[in-house]
Image (cartoon, coloured by chain):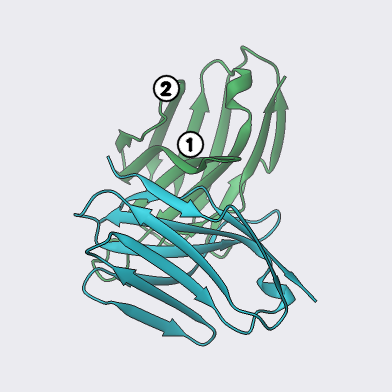
Amino acid sequence: GENVEQHPSTLSVQEGDSAVIKCTYSDSASNYFPWYKQELGKGPQLIIDIRSNVGEKKDQRIAVTLNKTAKHFSLHITETQPEDSAVYFCAASIRRDMRFGAGTRLTVKP
Amino acid sequence: DAGITQSPRHKVTETGTPVTLRCHQTENHRYMYWYRQDPGHGLRLIHYSYGVKDTDKGEVSDGYSVSRSKTEDFLLTLESATSSQTSVYFCAINADRSDNYGYTFGSGTRLTVV
């Protein structure tokens, strides 16, 4: 089955700096790559996603890139703010069979 | 988490006792999932449902069973709870749409087995 690895496990940045989280996947048939943000005591929330026929997608300060050849995808957050502090999960799926990475705890220091 | 609620939010139970967690949705979505979240493991799929009375196993299904008798409710049962089942359990839903595979998660149930 699909295996998703996520790095780093923890990331600390200064407010205003950029943050990058990287994931790799094993199954070349995976075609949907969502990113979720989980705040303390809450369920994960979808923040951005990308399909295998697209190389990059942006939504305000958040962007995701996908390299199908290398089987890796990344989340980029620019101009980080304290409210970006949370745990971020990547996932890879074939239709609805979704596998998640282990998560990255992002801390944005004011 | 609009449209999806989990109950209870917290539960402490003893080893060997049965436990049932409930997921209720008001979105009329076809797909429902149960995940467990543990440090270092992310989210792992326990069971999922693709319709009333239609369920299947995920990657960590041993020791768990599910039932879905109505579209809106998906129950997760631990027949005989063990300490290894101490975890945070999340339910998720997904519409039957080919243009949107993203999940909506509930707020979770923190289960402690002592």
Distance of label 1 from label 2 (alpha carbons): 16 Å
Q: Which residue is mark 1?
A: B75
Residue situated furthest bottom in the rendering: A60
Q: Residue at x 39, y 59 (%)?
A: B28
Q: Residue at x 46, y 50 (%)?
A: A101
Colour of chain A as rendered: cyan
Element assignment for label 2: loop
Percent position of residue A9, x then y: 58, 52
Q: Earlier in the sequence, mark 1 or mark 2?
A: 2
Callout 2 crowding tier (Cα within 10 Å): few <14, some 14–19, many ≥20:
few
Percent position of residue A10, x then y: 63, 55
Colour of chain B as rendered: green
Residue B103 is marked as none
Say what amino acid the circle numbered 2 marks: Asp
> Between tags 1 and 2, which lies in front?
2
Chain of the residue under the numbered disc 2 shown in the image: B
Task: In this rendered view, identify the residue nearer to me: B32 or A30.
Answer: A30
Chain of the residue under the numbered disc 1 shown in the image: B
Task: In this rendered view, identify the residue nearer to me: A60 or B93.
Answer: A60
Say what amino acid the circle numbered 1 marks: Leu
Q: Which residue is mark 2?
A: B62
Element assignment for label 1: strand
Q: Residue at x 63, y 84 (%)?
A: A79
Q: Quadrant of residue A91?
A: bottom left
Same chain for the residues under marks 1 and 2 in the image? yes
**A24 horizontally vs B10: left or right:** left
Image quadrant occupied by the C terminus of chain B: top right
Q: Residue at x 33, y 52 (%)?
A: A25
